[in-house]
Amino acid sequence: MAEMPPLPQQPYRDDVSGTELMPFRSKKISILRSRALIPLVATGLTCVLLFTIMGSVKSGQDVMMYMNVLATFLVFSMFAGLYFYMGERKNMLWYLVPFAITAFQLWFLLQPYFFVFRKLLPGDIAATGFVSAFIGMFFGAGLMEELLKAVPALLGLALALHLRKRATPGHPVLRNLALDGPVDGVLVGAAAGACFILIETLQQYVPNTIGEVMRNTKGDQGLSLLLGMMLLLPRVLNGIIGHMAWAGIFGYFIGLAVSHPRAIWKLLAIGWLLPSVLHGFWNSSSHLLGGAGAYVSGALSLFFFIACVLKAKQLEVSRLGGPIDGHSVLAVTAPSLGAPAAPGGVVPPKAPGLAGVFTGLATMAEKVVGFTARTTVPNPGAVPPAGPVALPESGLSIGAGAVRYALAPNQAIDFTTLFGAAGVPPGCAGLITGATGPGYDIRNTGQVTWAVTTPDGATSSVPPGGSVRATSGTRLMLGNATIDIQAF
C-alpha cells in the first residue's frame, strides 16, 4: 500500500483579524447572494411555524394547517435538492413563476381540461381491466395533467424563441422567464409538478380521506387526522417519482427545443407522450400486476427521469464549458490549462454500469428525434488560427460549451460564426483591445447590444461601439447564448 503524503503545514498567525471574529463584516463574502440563504431561511421559518402551531392546537383546523406547512416544506426540500444537484445558475425564486401558473390553472381553468380530455376524449371510461384502465388514465390523467403542468415551460419556450427571433437579449426579467435549455426545462417542470402534487394532496386526497374515516368511525376525529397525515407523507414524497418526475421529463424535451427549433414538434410530441404513458401506467398498473404495480411503474418513472436529469446536466456542462469533476460520468474532464484554449469537439465517454444505461437511453431518444448533442463540432472560420499559438498575456479564454478561444490583443471575434449553434443571433462581433491600465477590453463591433453580468453579479448593457473589461467570470448574454470568460 502506497504511503500517503503528509498533510501540508497550516500557517500560524498570532493575531485574529476583525472579519474573522465578526465574519458578517467581511467584504469578501455576501450573505444576500449566497445560494444557501433561501433553503436555510425556509427551514428555519418552517421549524418555528410548526412549533408555534403545535403549541396552540385547539381544533382539527389547526392540525390541517400543520399538515399544509409540513407538506409545503417537503415539496420545497425535494425541489431544492434537485435544483442544487442540477447546478442551475438562475435564482431559485424564479421558479415560483411556474408554480404560480400551475396553481392558477388548477384553481380557475381546470374545467376546460376536464371537458376536452374526459368528455371529448376517452379519459373517463369505466375500468373493467388493465386495458380500459390504462386508456382512461392515459387520456384523463396522463395527457391532461402533463399538458397542464407543461404550460409554464411552453410559455418559456415561446418567449425564448421570440427573443432569438428579435436577436436581442431582452429585459433581464424576460431573460429569466425565457427557457434557456434542458436543465431549466427540467426545473420548470419539477416546479409545476411540485405545485400539482401539493394542491392535489392538500385540497383533494387528504380532506377526502379524513371525511371518509370520520363517517366510517362515527366522528373519530383523532383517527381521521392521523390517517390523513399518514396519507399526506407518501403522497407528497411520491412527487419525486410522480408528478415532479413526469413534468420534469416533459420539461427536458421542451428545453431541448430551445436549441433545436427545427425538431420542435418531434421533441414536444415525445415529451408529451412519454410521461403521459408513464403516468397512465402508474395509475393502472395495479390492474395488471397487483401490489407490485406501484414498484414497477415507479421504477420506470424514476429510470426515465434520472436519464433526463443526467443528460440535461451533461448538455449544460458542455454548453457552458464550466469546470467538471474528473470523476463525473456526465462529461470529460476539462482540458489542461497549460496550453492555449482551442476549439475542439467533445464526445463524453460512455459511463460504466447503470449510469451508462441512463445516458445510452438518452442517446437513443436523440437518434429517434434525428439529432445528437453529444458531440460539439467546431465552427468554420474559428479564431485563433490553426497551429500552435503562444499563450497570450491575458491568460483568459472566451467560449460557450466545449469550444473555447484564447484572448489575444487586436483579435477580432465573430460571435455569430463561432457560437451560432449556441444561440448567438446574427450581427454579434467584437474586438480585443488594450484597456486603460493592465488587461484587455472587448469592444462591441457588431449591431446587437450585449447584456453583461460581471463576477460580482452586477448587470449592464454594452451597445455597439461600447466596451466591457475582459475579466474571469464575466458573462455576455447574446440572444439565448451565454458566452463566458474564464482564466487559464
Image (spheres, rainbow, N blue to C red):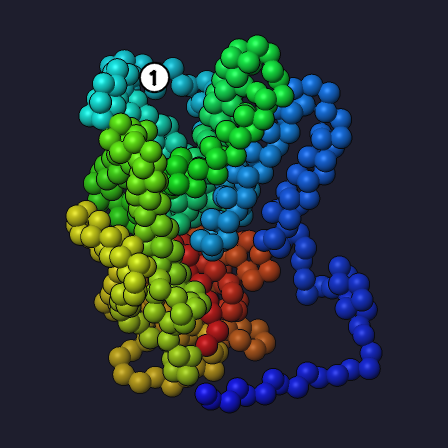
Say which quarter of the image contains residue 44: top right
Say which quarter of the image contains residue 330: bottom left
In x, y percent, where is residue 428? 36, 57
Say which quarter of the image contains residue 266: top left
Q: Is residue 72 left or right of residue 388?
A: right
158 versus 432 height, above or below: above
Residue 310 vs residue 68, the one in the foreground: 68
Residue 88 vs residue 170, the one in the foreground: 88
Residue that badge 1 annotates: 114
| Rendered residue at 41%/19% (across/down) | 109
* Residue type beneath disc 1: Phe
Residue 407 vs residue 345, the one in the foreground: 345
Residue 138 seen by the camera: no
434 versus 281 height, above or below: below
In x, y percent, where is residue 26? 74, 64
| Rendered residue at 24%/53% (across/down) | 361
Q: How many marks?
A: 1
In x, y percent, where is residue 16? 81, 74
Label 1 SS: helix
| Rendered residue at 75%/59% (across/down) | 24
Q: Is residue 90 left or right of residue 419?
A: right
